[in-house]
Structure formats: structure tokens, C-alpha cells
Amino acid sequence: MENTILIKHLLKHPSVMIFLGLLAGFTLLVVGLAEGAGIGLISTSFVKTLGKTLCLCMIAIAMDLVWGFCGILSLGHFAFFALGGYIIGMWLMFARTKLIVLEAAQNAVLPMTQSEVSQAVGTQIFGVVGGAEIPAIWTFADNFWIQIAFVVLVPGLLALIFGWLAFRARVNGVYLSILTQAMTLALALYLFQNDSGLRGNNGLSGLQNIPGFDAVSQADISIWFFIASAGALALIYVLAYGLISSKMGNIIRGIRDNEARVRFLGYNVESYKLFIFVLTAIIAAVAGALYYPQAGIINPAELAPIASIYLAVWVAIGGRGRLYGAVIGAAFVSLLSSYFTGGQAPDIPLGFGTLRWTEWWLVLLGLSFVGVTLYAPKGIGGLIDHLTRKRGV
Amino acid sequence: MLRNLLLLLLPVFLIFSAPNISASPLSSFEELLERNAKLIQKSSSKTVDPVLTEIQEFGGQMAAIFMQSWIEKKLYFVKDTGAFVLAEPAGKNEAGKKMMTVKGALDGKPLGKMLAKSLKQIKPNSGVRAKIASALVPIQIGSDDIETRKIGLIALSRDIMPSHLPPLKRAIEQEVDEDLKRAFQQTYIYGVISHSDDEAEVEAAIYSLKDSLSLDARAALNPLLTSQVRVSKTQPEGQNIARIIIPGRSVRLSDGTAGKQVLMSGADPELSLATAYQMLVEKGLAAAAPTEDSRKETLVAMAEDGQIGPFGLTTLNTDAARNKAYDWLVENNGAPPRVLKAEMEQAVSAHIFYAVYDHPSKTVTNAAREVLAGINSQVMVYKLLDLALDGLSLASIYFLAAIGLAITFGVMRVINMAHGEFIMMGAYTGYVIQLLVPSYTISILLALPAAFCVTFLAGVAMERLVIRHLYKRPLETLLATFGISIALQQIAKNIFGTQARPLTSPAWLDGAFVVNDVLAISNIRIAIFCLGLLFLGLMLYVMTRTRFGLETRAVTQNPAMAASMGINPDRINMLTFGFGSGIAGIAGVAIGLFSKVTSELGSDYIVQSFMTVVVGGVGNIWGTLAGAAMIGSLQKGIEWFNPSNTLAAQTYMIIFIILFIQFRPRGIIALKGRAVED
């Protein structure tokens, strides 16, 4: 019953089908051209970049849900993203270090005891911050499934507590933005400490190596992660689409447009906001858990408040209140950023000097952002709307 | 050549002529040196003592000069005659040989030039130099020249010897300069404490330090209380016992008297069970216990064909299994038996562990402990005061950073994420002006108005070009100004580079206002506090007493009504935003003075600044002050509990603020009435 309604709905609104089709086509294209599976036209590192971009699109959808549809400008969603990365990174690092330790001890006369193994693993992981003991938060780091559950539970719980406190006190608008930014800063500062149990500013590294799959080349692993990211993105897109086209989606949009009116209509505005906040935090965490194994390293700098503002920038450039807008914005700006800051872009010789893109890209980005806010508040998505409507008429 | 020969003979002549005028001190001192010539020429710290004693007894200015030049390695002797001279390089003669200008070692009489080859420098090693310096001190402090006495005092305060006490006492009696006399007395007290054998005298000296907060006083008292841990079978007697120790428990006795126990919660035990047992083993009071590592080694060494007795090596992956296998080895191969924890505890509890003061006298250690406890509690009070001042100065920094925001955000409700970059622009303006104007004082005085002008103009430009269009969309203002912020940051990086630029404060701001060894306030902190106060007064005056302030408040409350009263809202908005930005620029100069100027300077303060304004209460300058005071003192207060970790303090402070907002969502000083809902 539910399914048929959804299918009917999808047929009436073809944008989801178009998006899924394009995503599938893109995935097949990349896999076909990649080093790992295809003809090797795309390098492994670029496959990783594309996979990471898909993860960024995922968190952009989360940001679009919470900001574009519900009107909460959260500047803390990158904290959830990084938290997801940290939690999966703990498993990756612990399990792999343990394998290495056990392998090294294979030829020893005496087999290692449990405490000796954890001692050795602790020294390996925490030696860099002058410790050897495994902190309590790593208790379940050895267990993949528990860590996966934590990827969802920990950021979800954090978002629940924070959101409950903030929405209950009716902290709105810019105050909420500043408060979420403060939360991100607090988390980042906490993780910067050496005794936070997560290796301080060294962060977690070597995440690209999947424990137990040492024999598999990075080229293959990058393909797996790319496909997984594409699948997760498709899933989250459909989920988000289902949400916004449901009755609940209408209420949420109502909250964005006039919170007081929705409240007076008898809806419990706080619960709806909390639901969206927690849901998007979880989406962000899942995206992070897929992102950081492709990035290979995570450190507290990833949580800097500025990252979350960039996220808002992507969504605004792509066009708020449109799911595909968020995806386009994230993909467009992040790929462009890595192109220009990566030093591949050709410098432009001016009469009096050279314009180096690595130096001036951020200036251009900042100013274009001002331009978008001033003159194209609907972003690229608005442009697409404009074009399709014209064609329709 | 002939002249050289004559010169060579001159000191010889002097020495030979010495007996003729034996009545003068010069000749008798020369005679003393001649007797000890060998020991002086080749001195070692073992042999030099008798010579020094003799010279010291001789005393007088001459001995002081001699010893001083000896220490400074200016002393030479003539190889042929053994006479002591002072020499300095004097170029080369016609034959290309190195020459030296020579003077008498005692009277400084010029003796012309000599061949460098014919002289040999006396190079005392550091041990000898220390001994000479020590011997020199009594002569120095007994000198008629006040500067020499001061030099002697410095040497004494560095290292005082028992032999210095009597001359020092004499020097105190003779001293006429009040300051120097007090310093001599202080040094004498430290000397008595560390060297005197007279218990009563030491005790009196210790009590005289009662109110001294100086580091020297604590450094003099602490060595009296060092102690060694010992163990015995019976109640120890006849020793100066510091405390009885119960190993493995966090219990120590607060003072030497037995019975009174203080629980040091959370602290590690002074003596762990394992260490205590190890002490017993070393004393031969208990059997050695094989450590875990040595047991493991034994297991590895005794293994045959992957087996230890009946146990397969592969099964030994738990402590229990390893213990079993080891016990089998104990029984069958004579390995040293394990000592169980219960046995260890029994052995340890059968003995008495105690700490003994190195100082033998109970009177002295008790006095030292009492005085030190008094000093420490006073130090604690001053440290708290210091903490309060720290909090105050941090609060004034936050206030400075946030006060511009209190106008743009607090009054106009514009979220200006580029506020931090205005602070940075102000700091860079100061830096550029310092490049142009060499005098630091003038450049700082110029920088303040210049920074105001630069950021005022930047603020006006930003308001005209961007913010004006977004008054109805506050969230988008946030994003647009963030765009400006990253652009400005990158531009600053492109112009000034990534390395930090210094903004040097003038010399009169460099010092500190020193209350005592614990409490000192740097002048720059005082200056920033004063600047904060000044700003507060200025803001209050502008906002409440001037026409511009009145118009600003009118426009922010109701632009349409203000416009109908003949106020131009556009103009007022522009000027208000410029004013807030300009103040951020001045704050930038102040902040740049104590932290390095980088392009990221502003972003370090932006979140804190917004929190200051939000916590304090939007739209109220007193609120910003209250917010800054709360955040500053809170952060320092948290740091007090964990001084090594400022990051943790910041984290907890932010969490506290998030919780605080729950209870007072509108800040400490909340606006009431219609202004609240806008």
C-alpha cells in the first residue's frame, strides 16, 4: 500500500527518477573508467575524490533538510559528520593495529595474553600522545558492528540532547546558529586535547587500510567505497524525498515559513524540529563514516566551525529547499575548490603580475558567495527551476 | 732585542728587590705569592685551599684584585722568573713575534711589552674558580667600596658557604647603606638556615622568614624538609621522623607526630605495595619475587619442544595458564616461587615504613614546616588574587573584541561574521604604521585612530554594498558576511603572507607592576583593562548622551517611525555600522599588542565575541560587559582546577554557556517590553 503510493508519487514527480538515473549512470561511468575495475582512465585518487564528493552531497542533503526545509541554520552538522568519521576510524585503526600486533607476535615463543595485546595496541596507537592505556571510549573499538551502531547512536544522542535543550528554550534563528557553532567549537577544542582519548591533534590515521583486506589494492577499495557512497546517497535522497513530500514535510516547511502560526495550529513544533535535527545529524554521521575511510585521515581541524559554514555555503549556492540543489551545490563547489586549490588550475598572467588561483580562489569564492546571496538567493537550483518552468510553458 | 731583555729582567729585579722593603704590604704579599708560586701556577681544586686561606687571611684590596684577575684568567707568570703579571695582547713586533703589554699583578704598574712566548697564562678550572670566588667574598663584603660590596652580595646569594657567615655578620654590623644592610641580613638568614649548627639560631632564622613570600625564602626552607623513606622491623627511635607510611594506601601523616592521619583523596599512595616490597627485598627482609617479565623469560627459557611439562606453549595465552605453568616449573625445575599479593601484603604490614628528615633536628624541621605552611597559605591567597586579575584581563580582552559587535549585532541585529576580520584589519593597520613610523609610542598613538578610520570605511562600504540589501533576511546576512570574511582573510594572507607579524608595544608597556614574587601584573594587561573601561564609557556616552545615539536607537526600534520624524535611516544605519566596525579596528590594535598578528587573528575571537554578546544580553552594553566578565572569569576559574589544559577549560566554558542559555535565553541582562520581539 505504502509502496504503491510512493511509486505513484514518484511517477508524478520525475525529478527523483531523473536524479537516480543520473547517479546510476555516473557511477557506472566512473567504475568503467576507473583503475580498479575499468580501463584505468580515472586514477585511484580521483575515484576517492569523487567518492568523497558523493559523501559531501549526502551531508549537503542533511543540511538542506534542516536549513532549506525546516529553517534551522545549523552550523554544527560538520561536527556530526566528523564524529561519524571518528567512530568508524576508531574501529579501522584499532582492528588493523591489533592485526599488525598479532602478526608481529606470531613467531614469539609464548602466545600473547589479552592484556599484553591491548597493551601493545595501546602503545602503538597512543604512543604519539605519550600514553599506552586504551581509554574507556575505545572499549568496543574492536567490534565492527557495535562501532557501526555507535556511528548512528552517538551523534544522534548528541543531537537529541543539544536539540532538546535548544528547542525547549526556544532558541531561534541566529541565536541557534551561534549556539550550534559554539557546540562545534567545544567539540573541536575537546578533541584537540591530547588526553581526549582520540590522539589529540594527531587525529586518527591510516583509515584507508581496511582491516582484513590488506591483500586488496587501494584501487579496488576505492571502487567499493565509491559504489557504497553512491548507494548511500541514492538511499538518503529517496528517504529525504519521501520525507519532504509527506504530510510531515508540509508541517516542516510550515515551521520554516511561520513557526508561530504552525504552533498556534496545534502542532508541537519542538518535536518536529528535534526530529529533523536528529535525523539530519545521523545522515551527516553516516556520510562522515563513509567519507573518512576514503580520506584516510581525520583530525580535529576537520571540525573547525568554518567547515560547517562552508556546508551552508554549498547548500546556498546549490539552492535551498531543493534536494537536487544541495547535491549540485556540494558537488560543484567542492570539486571546484579542490581543482583550484590543488594547483592544477592554470595561473592567469595579468599585465602587472600573475593571478595565482591557489591564492585568489578563496577570495573569488567568498565574493561569489556574497553575489549569490544578494542576487540569486535561490542558487543554481533556482536557475534550473527557471529553465524547466519556461520549457513547461 | 736589548730592550726586551731589559724588560724581562725588570720583574726579576722587582722580586729581588722585595726583601729590601719588607715593611710594606706589597712586599709581604709578594713574599706570600712567591712561597706558593707553584700551587698558584698549577692549581687544582684539591690543592688550592691552603693558598686561598693564606691570601684570605692576608686580606685587603690587593688580595681582592689578585684573586679577581686570577678568576678572570688575566693572570700570567713570567716563565723564567715565575713572577706574576697581568698581560694583554699587543700585536706583533718587527720580527713578527706576538707581543703582550705587561703590568704588575699587584700594583698595576706598567712594565712595558714582552714576548708572548715568555709568558704563560694561568688558567684555573671551574672548580678552582668557584673556590677563589668563595674566598674572595669576605674581602669583597668587607671592602670600603659599596659597588664591590654589592658584587660580593650577589656572589653570596648565589652560593653561601659556612665560612662566609662570620665575615657576613661583621659586614652587617659595619654596613651603612640601609638597603644593602637589609639584603645582607636576608642573605645571612639563608646562610644560617642552610649551614649553622646552632639549633636555636636556625630556628630564629626560620621564624624570621614567616611573612616572606619570596621564592628565595621557599627555596631556603624546602631543603630542610627533604626526607628519605626507610623501613624497620620495630618502632624506629632516635630519628627525626617525618611521617609513618602505610604502603599502598593514600594515607600519610600530616606531621611528624604519629596518629593524626590525613586522607589524600585521589593522590597516588606515597609508597606503592610493590615498591615497599622491593625495599624489603633490598634490605634482605623478604624473599625476592620474580616479576612478571622475569617469569615470562623463565617460561620461554625452559620451554622444550613447545611444551612446559604437561602444558603446551600455545595454550599459555592467559595469565592464569601462565601462572599454572610457572608453578609447575617452581616445583620441578627450581624456579624462584611466585609471591602472591596476600603474602606481599603480609610481609609489608609486618614492617614499619617511615620517612626520616635529612635534617637531624626536630626543632628545626618543625619550625620549617610551620613557617612553610604559613607561607604557602599566603601564597595561595595571592595566587587566587592573581587568578582574579587574570580573569579580569581576559574579560577585558573579550570585552574589547565584542564591544564592536555589541553595536552591529546587539543594537542593529546584523550578524557580521566579518567582525573578526575587522579586528584583524585593525591589527594589520597598526603593523603597517609601525613599519612607517619608527617610534613605538608615536606609532601606537597613531595606529589607534588610523585603525578606526580604516575599519570605519570598510564597515561603511560593506553596509552600503551588501548588508543594506539584507536587513530583512538575517540568516542570509550571516552567510554573505561569512563570504566577505573568507575573502578578507585570504586577501590579508596574500598581502602579508602566512607568518605572524609583530606589533611591538612601546617600552613603557613592557614591564610589569610587581607586588611580590607571586603577584605581578603586566602593564599591557593594565593598559587593556583601561582601554576597555574607556570604551565602555565612550559607548555609553555615544549611545545615551548624543544625538547620533538617540537616532540609532530610534532607527533600530522602528525605522518607519524614525523616518517620519525626519531621521534618515539609511544614513544612521551606515554610520552605526561604521562606528561598530571602527571600534573593532581599535580593539584589533590592542589585541595585536599581546598576540601575534596573523590573518587568522579575527577568526580566533569571532565565536567568543558572539557568545559574549549573546550571554550578556543582546542590545545592552552593560550586558556585553557582564557577558565578558562571566566568560573571562569562568574560563580562568576552570583553568584553576587544571592549569595545564586551557583547551579543556575552553571546552567546559562553552558547554556551560550552552547550558546557561537554556535558563536565560535572552542573556544575563535581558531586554524587556516591546524591543524583545522584533
Image (cartoon, grey):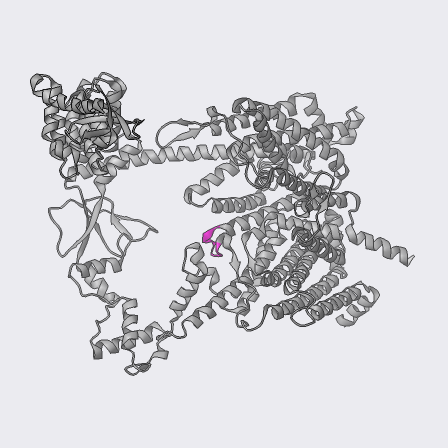
Residue B451 appears at what percent x and percent y? 62, 28
Q: Quadrant where the C terminus of chain A lies?
A: bottom right
Q: How many marks?
A: 0
Q: Can residue B205 be seen by looking at this rendering?
A: no
As for residue A195 lying within the magenta part, the answer is: yes
Q: Name the residue rendered at 19%, 39% in the picture.
A: B365
Residue B143 appears at what percent x and percent y? 20, 20
Give above or below for B344 relative to B597. Answer: below
Pick the front one: B69 or B154: B69
Pick the front one: B658 or B339: B339
Q: Name the residue rendered at 79%, 72% in the picture.
A: A4
Q: Name the residue rendered at 27%, 73% in the picture.
A: B298
Quadrant of residue A17 within the rendered picture: bottom right
Q: Can residue B30 be seen by looking at this rendering?
A: yes
Give above or below for A88 relative to B395. Answer: below
Write the start and end of the magenta stretch as one range. Answer: A193-199
Pick the front one: B143 or B419: B143
